[in-house]
Image (spheres, rainbow, N blue to C red):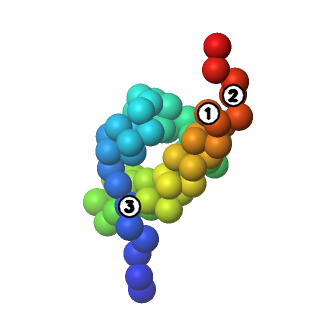
Amino acid sequence: MEFPVSLLIDQAAAILGVSRRTVYYRIREGLLRTVRTRCGSQRVVLESLEEQVRASARRRRRTPAR
């Protein structure tokens, strides 16, 4: 069984430039996928994190500069 590459919640927050709480909100909303380790900790799947980074970049490009 192959496991997806994943990051700690803190690492995901740093990459996205948001707080840990925001990462948990995005997990609950289904915007970020997670896996549980054998120890029970929750980790963010890298692929879903990359999708969020791309979506954020698209939103910034569409927003006109002030």
Q: Is residue 6 above or below residue 30?
A: below
Badge 2 amino acid? Thr
Left or right of 29 on screen, residue 52:
left
Q: Is residue 38 above or below residue 21?
A: below
Left or right of 25 on screen, residue 37:
left
- The residue that mark 2 highlights is 63
Q: Measure the C-alpha gap from mark 3 to mark 2.
A: 30 Å
- The residue that mark 3 highlights is 6
Give the foreground label among 3 and 1. Answer: 1
- Choose top left, top right, bottom left or bottom right for residue 46: bottom left
- In terms of depth relative to the viewer, which is nearer, 37 or 14? 14
Q: Is residue 26 above or below residue 30?
A: above
Residue 32 at x, y percent in the picture = 55, 50
Report the number of discs: 3
Residue 55 at x, y percent in the picture = 62, 46
- The residue that mark 1 highlights is 60
Mark before the other along the chain sequence, 3 or 2: 3
Q: Which residue is found at the position 50% from the left and 62% from the top?
A: 47
